[in-house]
Structures are given as structure tokens and as C-alpha cells.
Amino acid sequence: MNFLKLIRYQNLLMLAFMQLIFRYGFLKLQNVPLALTEWQYVLLVLSTVLLAAAGYVINDIFDQDTDNDNKPKDVIIGKKITEAKAYNIYAALNVTGVGIGFYLSNVISKPGFAAIFILIAATLYIYATSLKQMLILGNIIVALLLSFSVIIIGIFDLYPVVDQVNQPIMANLFSILLDFALFAFMINFIREIVKDLEDIEGDSNQGMKTLPIVLGMHNTSKLASILGLIPMAFLLVYINNYFVANDLIVTTIYAFAFVVAPLLYFSVKVWPAKTKKEFRKLSLLLKWILFFGIISIAIITLNIKYNASK
């Protein structure tokens, strides 16, 4: 159980579910060729999950002092798992994840793509050791890595089978993946700021320079509120241009109820928020918004197929 807590198994399950939804709730229903077989795609998901898990482990190794201030009851390394064992776990997760990446890159006859997995592992290490302490940059890196877990699906499952005949539809599918990757980036970037608000005390004690420490808690809360309105505005335009225009009524209702409305609620509630408990709840809300936003890809696909069958 300590190992599962160390690698944030709930977040990893959500990451895996997200990638499976894109494959089986979207791409598999488009009647297009895909580069990976079923079990090879599972390996792609596994590789992504292993590298993410390694990122959580190395982050906890370097965050021991900060975590002892911010969440002493949740500290694993140094209390329940030794630092030496944590490093071994980190190495095993990375080696396995990158190894699978090498195999998949050769499967699609793109051996150079193995560098993607090495770059992800290296970026997570650099983030934990130095980038995390840099103003805003650390937040951006984490948000980019999550959004890249959507893009990598297109890189390994669509790009290798693109030809002159299917190029237009493949480009359209990849564009949709990019839209969702952008959504994931925006939501996770805001969530990272909220997590910094939650951890301001411990971060300050460790001499870190996060937005709440530099701008102050109240100003950062207002900034998070304003930032929450940006993806909401994009979503409203997207809903009007694609869902309403194509008579996707179910998808429109779903988007308003499970993504737009919660985002509006977040922006209203984070403005006056002051306590650690409030920020923890708002961070969890953003995670659910991201979850329901990702699921919408399956809702859209099924709504289109239902309309076509009428």
C-alpha cells in the first residue's frame, strides 16, 4: 500500500483511463487504420504510466522537507520507504518505461521516437531537482507533460499509418487530439497554481519561489479565478461552433453540466478562498473537470453515431 501511495496510483489510473478512452471511445470508432495492435497499445499506456510513476517517486525524494511541512501525515519516503529503496524503485520504473518505449518505436519502424521516452524521463528528473523551484516554469512543465500523454497517442497510433489517401481524415483526428491536449494543459496548469496555494507554507519555509509566494495568496487566488475563465470561454466557442452547429444536443448538455458549470463554480470559489482545505477541494474539482472533459470525447463520438443512425 505504501508503494501505491508513493506512485499516486489514483492519478495513474486516471491517466491510463484517459488514454484508453481516446483509443476505444474515439479512434477505434473512426474506421481508420491504427498502427498499434491491442496489446501494443496497452504497452504504450503502461510505458506512460511507468514514467509518470517514476516522476512521482523522484519528486517525493527531493520534496521530503517540503512535504514534512505541507502534509506530514502523507510522507512515505524516509518514514515507510527508505530513500535508497525509493531510488531503486525510481530506476526500475524508468528503465522499464523507456525499454517499452524502445520496443514500440521499433514496432512502428520509427526507432528515433524512443528519444521521446528518454526526454520525458529526463524532464521529470530535471523538474524534480530544479525546474520545480522556478517561477511558473515548473507549473508549465507539469501541465505540458500531461497534455503530451494525449499527443503521444497520435504520434504512435496515427502518424505511422498516414498515407496520401487517408491524410485529410488523419489530420482531422490529430487536430481533435490537439484540442483535448490543449484543454488538459490549461486545466492542469491552473491546478498546479492551486496546489501551490495549498502548499504555500511549506514551500515558503524551503525558500521556493512559487506564484503565491511572489504575488501573495490573495493575488494568486484572483489570478487562478481569471485563468479559470479562459478555458471556459474557449469551451463556449467550441460548443457553439462544433456541438450546437452539428446538432450534438447530448454532448452540448454534457459539456455545460460537467465541464463549463464546474469551471464557473471554480472561478467563483477560488477568488475568496484562503484556507488549505478550500484549495485542496478546488484542486480536486479541477481534477474531476479534467476527467469529465476527457470522457466527453466518447460522448461526442457516440452522439455523432446516434445522429447518423436516425
Image (tube, helix red, strand yellow):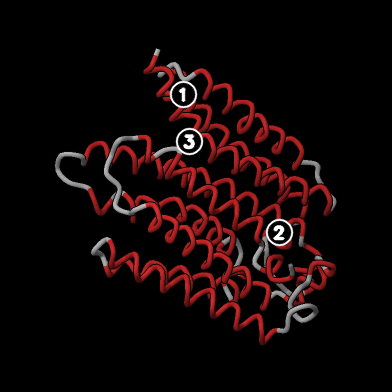
Please report contact status of discs 3 and 1: CB closer than 8 Å, yes or no.
no
Which residue appears at 74% of the width and 70% of the height? 2
Tell us which disc is closer to us: 2 or 3: 3
Please report contact status of discs 2 and 1: CB closer than 8 Å, yes or no.
no
Which corner quadrant of the image does residue 27 belong to? Answer: top left
Report, in whole angstroms, how far the alpha carbon at label 2 lies from the one at label 1: 38 Å
Which corner quadrant of the image does residue 73 belong to? Answer: bottom right
Which corner quadrant of the image does residue 115 belong to? Answer: bottom left
Question: Element type at marker 1?
Answer: helix
Q: Which residue is mark 2?
A: 196
Marked residue nearer the N-terminal end (2 or 3): 2
The percent position of residue 285, horizontal first and vertical second, equals 70, 43
Tell us which disc is closer to us: 2 or 1: 1
- Which is more toward the observer, 108 or 216? 108
Residue farthest top in this picture:
310
Say which mark, if any, is on residue 297. Answer: 3
- Which is more toward the observer, 24 or 183? 24
